[in-house]
Image (cartoon, grey):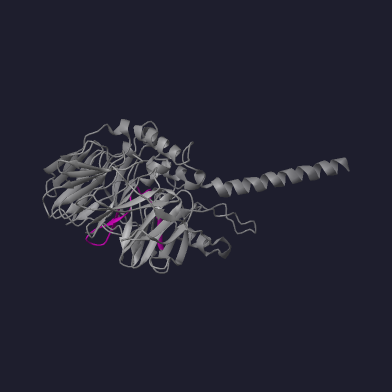
Amino acid sequence: MRKLSLLLLCLAVSFILLSALIVARSSFGHSKRSFTDTMSGKDIRQEIVALNSNEKMKPTKAFRSGHVSSASLTNYFHKTENGYYIQLPAETMVPTPAIIDGNIFLSGGFGSKQYYSFESTSGKIKWAIDLDDDGPSSPAIEDGIIVFNTESCTIFACDLVTGKMIWSYYLGDPLMSMPSIANGIVFTSYPAHYAADFQGTRNDSLKVWPTHVLIAIDLKTGNILWQKWIDSDIMSAPVAKNELLYVTTFSGAVYKINQKSGDILEARAMRATSIPVFSSDNEVIVSQRTDTKNDSVVSESIAYGIGSKSRTTFSKKAHYLDKKVQSKSNLKSYSMKMDAGNGFATGAPTTSNWMAAELNIGYSNVSSLQSFQGSRGLYIKNRLYNTMGDEIICTNDAGDVKWKYNLQGDLKNEGGFMGTPPIYCNGFIIVATFTGEVLILNEKDGRVFSKYEIKNPVRYQPVVDKGWIYVTTANGRLYAIDTGNPSITGWNMWGANAARNNVN
């Protein structure tokens, strides 16, 4: 009897430990399931579709609402030689603003709970609001509604003229992407737990284990239209083109989805390091990790297409994606400090699935992942322009280099990119740099047409409108620069427009 009791006790303990292991794997197993190194090029559509077909595992629709109240801002305006700058109270990383109808719409920065609207040429404040969450993202604007995420942890839709909240959802912590809008639908992502199914449908051979949800919301009503499990958080923002939606996840997977139905048309693990742009032939173009486990140096290439016939062209060494380099950089120290200020004293939480991101792009903090824009290209007139680390590179469709421009800055020591993703305005390529320069380059040969010194570090893409350039800094400022050239116009939001598709 004693042996039987001991045996039963051992079996009970074993069952408890096994159950705990299953739960732990379901919660944290994605750190070992990243396909960054092992599944490059693999078609994962069937697995993703299967995960979304399980009725027991549908994402929740029960989200509480956020809150917005009036705020104020004083002593913020400072005149400069070429315009002005606004100093925000938080003095942290400020995302790209938006310019609509002569007004600026600006996040208060990673460590703030404020959003602002200013008159674009005078800097006069129009409205200011307090949020109940911090870290507001770059906005998307359409039909008089401004939409933005907060890192912790809410999506807000507000009236563009007054700042009054229209709808909001507390989605989850942290939110690291910007929302996008197309065809009256808002697209964004949030972290969620895909629970283990103890009824036997769980398949441990799965290489894809979802940690995030892609959600579609009606812009005007806030009604949730559909939700889909994806393997990790969305890099930068969803990209909309016509009736399709494209997302790159931090693990390096690229998805093609029907905007209205949410049907997943394609999903491929390809170690992508940027969100898509599109060629003149409507071919998807992303940057992509191409080093192997045997390589001592990380490399990045340009990839045309996401299917089995995709091809890579230009390639270069990419210390800016190497986790060994990034973990020792000033950007890492800065990101740890910003994370701690937002409640992540030990770094990003497991819910962010930072492990997949670190394996693919070398970054692992909430603040550095929220601000990551990668080597996203700009495709104009059969040429592709990319800021890759400390170079601006212009290539043709075959990958031949037409011109390069070297950027200043100690890439390895500072960490990240020494310049922003390029924007295009009527024959000019514009890039802002970490060393505090705003460059206007000739699209044909890369020669500098003009240069403005703001002497403050920049990490986010600038925007332009009616001859003015607006650029935010990593220490809480917005610079407004009057170029005197009205052809410098037409790039009003991050990614040019609310769809983020780089078309101005």
Q: Give the range drawn in magenta.
A: 265-285
As drawn, 272 above or below 490? above
Question: Where in the figure is residue 393, as x and y percent of width and height?
Answer: 20, 44
Image quarter of residue 387: top left
Please indicate whether residue 135 sits to the left or right of residue 456 in the image: right
**Looking at the image, is 335 positioned above or below residue 54?**
above
Residue 459 percent location from the top left of the image = 29, 42
444 in the magenta segment: no
Would residue 457 be seen by someone viewing this image from the given angle? yes
Q: Which residue is drawn at 11% across and 46% down?
A: 445
Classify the position of the N terminus by image quarter.
top right
**Picture residue at 47% right of the left edge, 47% below the top:** 352
Q: Position of residue 50 (x, y in %)?
A: 51, 62
Residue 400 visible? The answer is no
Vertically, is 275 above or below 291?
Answer: below
Viewer-proximal residue among 41 and 190: 190
Does 68 sit left or right of 51 as displayed?
left
